[in-house]
Image (cartoon, helix red, strand yellow):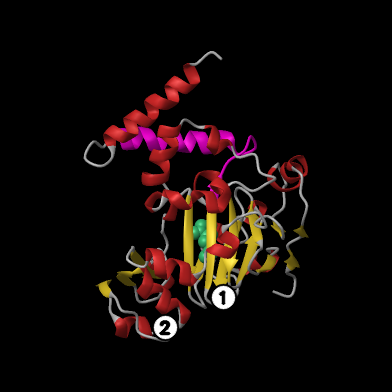
Amino acid sequence: MQRARPIVRKRGFDAAEFVRDHLDDGGMPVVVGDALDAWPARTRWTFEFFREHYGDDEIIANRPMFLEPDLGLAPVQARMRLADYIDYIEDARRAPRARYTVGDLDALRRDRVPLYAPIYRVLNLHPELAADVAGSTLYFMDDLFTRLPGALRGFLDRCGSPIHYLFFAPRDSVSFLHTDYWSSHAYLAQLAGRKLCVLFAPDDDENVYHGAVRNPLAVDLARFPRFAAAQPYVALLEAGDTAIVPSGWWHFVVGLSPSLTYSYNFFTTHNMADYLARMIAFLLDAAGAPAQHGDEAAAALAALREALGKDD
Ligand SMILES: O=C(O)CCC(=O)C(=O)O
Ligand SMILES: [Fe+2]
């Protein structure tokens, strides 16, 4: 990783500069230092706050995070109260108070990678918290997702890939190398603790073997020789920092301490065509599967048709 470059840090953004330098073609990732200054969550959302008010929520935590079978880690899935998960992430050497649905404590202890809860859709469970994250917007961000009809947004946020989510992470939490779904842009808003992010541009697709390189900090160059040509960009995220991950950028994130990250996926004119094409394919698929959320998906599609049909 000697050739890693630091991700640029900025403050005091304006919307046009943000889009031009970071989201349009060739746009670079950035860490914004003042994006969360006006968010009540920045001071209010602590481990203590969630333990006290939302401790009874159920958390599903996995190792690895999405139970990826190709990582050579003994798979573990555990269900527990959020309060118990917070106790665990504060010191992941302790045994969690959990009910195992895959693997067990012995399996968990066989490897240093800890449990990590992939999806906690905090605002769906507790809509009263939306104001704490300013409705998920950042002061410089033109988020086209918010212009979709409400019924469609609600459906995607409940039943699609997560639009927003809150990560409670132990030290050594790992999100293995991936790009986000539907070519969305993402931000990672660090509310507490520290994480290390390693990113690669979409141009490095082949050099990271389309994600087959899962951990860029420990690459077998005999197996993945082209990785030597990949250009890593790194950032240390501290509480108050927000990392912008533009559409198509590969990212790998590891926890350096117990931490809390609010994440949001969005689209702009730059990635709109890909995003909407994938979104509509998803809706059509869902509408054709009545056993799952078919009716809701059909209603979401109808809302989209109506919004597009309006001649205002
Ligand atoms: O572990 C993290 O904070 C990164 C999560 C992430 O990138 C994702 O789930 O898409
Ligand atoms: Fe991601």
- On-image quarter of the C terminus: top right
Disc 1 Cβ-to-ligand 1 distance below 8 Å: no
Magenta stretch: residue 266 in it?
yes
Q: What are the residue bounds of the magenta stretch?
A: 264-287
* Front position in the image: 293 or 58: 58
- Mark carried by residue 260: none
Tell me which secondary structure the magenta stretch mostly adopts.
helix
Residue 92: image quadrant is bottom left
- Please indicate whether residue 97 sits to the left or right of residue 40 in the image: left
The secondary element bearing badge 1 is classed as loop
Residue 37: image quadrant is bottom right
Q: Residue at x 34, y 34 (%)?
A: 297
- Please indicate whether residue 185 sits to the left or right of residue 176 in the image: right
Label 1 amino acid? Answer: Asp
Question: Mark 1 sits on what residue?
Answer: 220
Question: Mark 2 sits on what residue?
Answer: 111
Q: Residue 75 in the image: x percent, y percent?
A: 34, 73
Residue 228: image quadrant is bottom right
Cα separation between marks 2 and 1: 19 Å
Q: Is residue 287 visible?
A: yes
Q: Nearer the viewer, mark 2 or mark 1?
A: 2
* Front position in the image: 144 or 291: 144
Q: Residue at x 35, y 76 (%)?
A: 74
The secondary element bearing badge 2 is classed as loop
- Please indicate whether residue 85 sits to the left or right of residue 27 in the image: left
Q: Residue 303 in the image: x percent, y percent?
A: 41, 26
| Residue reaching furthest to the top | 311
Q: Residue at x 76, y 60 (%)?
A: 8
Q: Residue 196 in the image: x percent, y percent?
A: 62, 71
Label 2 amino acid? Answer: Asp
- Please indicate whether residue 198 sits to the left or right of residue 73 in the image: right
